[in-house]
Image (tube, helix red, strand yellow):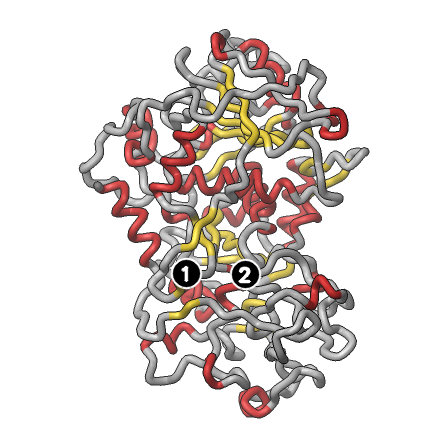
Amino acid sequence: MQKNSRLPRFIKLAVTGVALSWLAGCGGGGGGGEGASLPDAVSAKALTNTSADNYDHNRWGLIEAATLQSYADNWKTADTAAATLPPNGRPAHLASTARLVVLQFNGANRAAGENYIPAKPADNVYSYRIDDFRFNETRDTGLISASVRYQASGPKADSWLAQYGIDLSRDFVVLAQGENSAVNGSFFQELTRATYWLNYWGADPKRIAVLNGTLKQNYTGTLVNTLTADSSVSNGGFSVKSLRVDNTGLTIALEDFLKVVDANRAATGVIPGLNQQLIIDARPTAQFNRSTSTASFFDTHPGQFITTAWNSAGAPSNDATGKAKNYVLYEGHVKGAVSFPWATLLTDTGGNNWKYKSKADLATIFTTAGYAPTDKDSKVIISQCRTNFEVQVNGFAARLILGYPTVYFDGSLVEYASLVSGHPNAALNLLPADPAYKFRTDTAARSQRYVAGATEADVATTTESDSGVTPYNVANGAGAADRKTAVPVINRNATTTRKAIEEDREYKRI
């Protein structure tokens, strides 16, 4: 880990020398080395950032509202006094041509009109309300296609960045929530997934910040009701291809994830230099252990119809809304995963103003979950939940606040819990003759879902889990009040699950 030369007292950024050398040479525009071979993949250890103990001192990563206000008011001035709080201008590592691009997920006072950070084009300050794109896309992994959403592709990344005139080799992006529209801080899922996605495509962590809390509750500067018009500012044809780093290692493919599970979280060679793994499941614990009484059909099928499928959204509920949703093929959790509810990392400071807990508190929570600060040289965190949104809150805290190596199983449970060979509906099962049979997960070795004493024979002969023996979800009609399941599009002849990741690597070679 290298210390930031400008802010040695406050922030340490872990990057590899090769990553720095390539990033330093990148300019704007779509060229910047296209067609050249990529350097070796950047390690999970290098794709981390360590926050200051006091978030007020952060210049990137997790920042406070006073820091954003200083940026918006004084962007043309370089921050030359590292000890100043708040900073007296833009981060010192940025060139004078850098643009401040604030992306808000909503306005700061919607009851009285939408309020946004003022755009000042003359000062290179731009403000947008972000679109409804959730930083994911339907991809083909080789095994799964046309259903489960994964990291959005290179063309999607370039198109999205062009919409806001962003050049990731030059600009600084702040992701902010104007007003918390949820009761539990769930907007952090969107903000932090955006960071993960941009880092995946090569963005330097020093060029991205996430606002801690909401503008409505924390920002004391002037807010306005006008925004920079989309597409009014060009990024000169910038492409992520010009970021000549390979950060695709942030995402772990199913086949590699299964190696970790099969090796009891001590897989060697899967994630270079990190031969121990901690798998975290960020869902509420009651969903993790199938004890939630608010699950759909809980009155008739306790422990089932909890995990909504790829084409349904939100948590389960035992009402008409919940019963109208689709569910995965079986319930449970990944073998060896630990329950690590995302909401435990946040605190409401008042008025629905959810913020990350202190760095010290976060470290304690991670230690309790099984990852101590001394583990970072040997153990990697693998983050998963239902769709890889809830766990973004955990992943950001681990990777970009505490500096712990972290990767993401992007398919999460909507993929994992759909790869079956023992389901009562035989048409859904992978067969031993299918090349993709090796990816099945409904076994005792890969999924913790059995009660004490249950056997594989119990699974094969039990059609419902009323007794708790097997948690297969079984459809029962097509009406709004009937039980329904949804399975991804599965290629039974698949021999790899890395197709999308390899396509992303190839995109940067073009």
Label 2 amino acid?
Asn
Does the image show residue 327?
Answer: yes
Residue drawn at x 69%, y 68% is: 323
Mark 2: few/some/many CA within 10 Å (<14, 14-19, 20+): some
Label 1 amino acid?
Ala
- Where residue 239 sits in the image (x, y, percent)? 32, 32
Q: Are marks 2 and 1 in contact (CB under 8 Å)?
A: no
Quadrant into which the N terminus falls: top left
Residue 199 in the image: above or below residue 100: below
Q: Residue furthest right?
A: 350
Residue drawn at x 60%, y 67% is: 326
**How far apart, in angstroms, are the residues tagged by discs 2 and 1?**
11 Å
Q: How many marks?
A: 2
Find residue 146 and name its label.
1
- Where residue 274 sits in the image (x, y, percent)? 42, 53
Residue 50 in the image: above or below residue 234: below
Residue carrying label 2: 311
Q: Nearer the viewer, residue 507 or 361?
A: 507
Residue drawn at x 46%, y 47% is: 377
SS under mark 1 = loop
Mark 1: few/some/many CA within 10 Å (<14, 14-19, 20+): few
- Where residue 320 sits in the image (x, y, percent)? 74, 65
Residue drawn at x 44%, y 69% is: 263
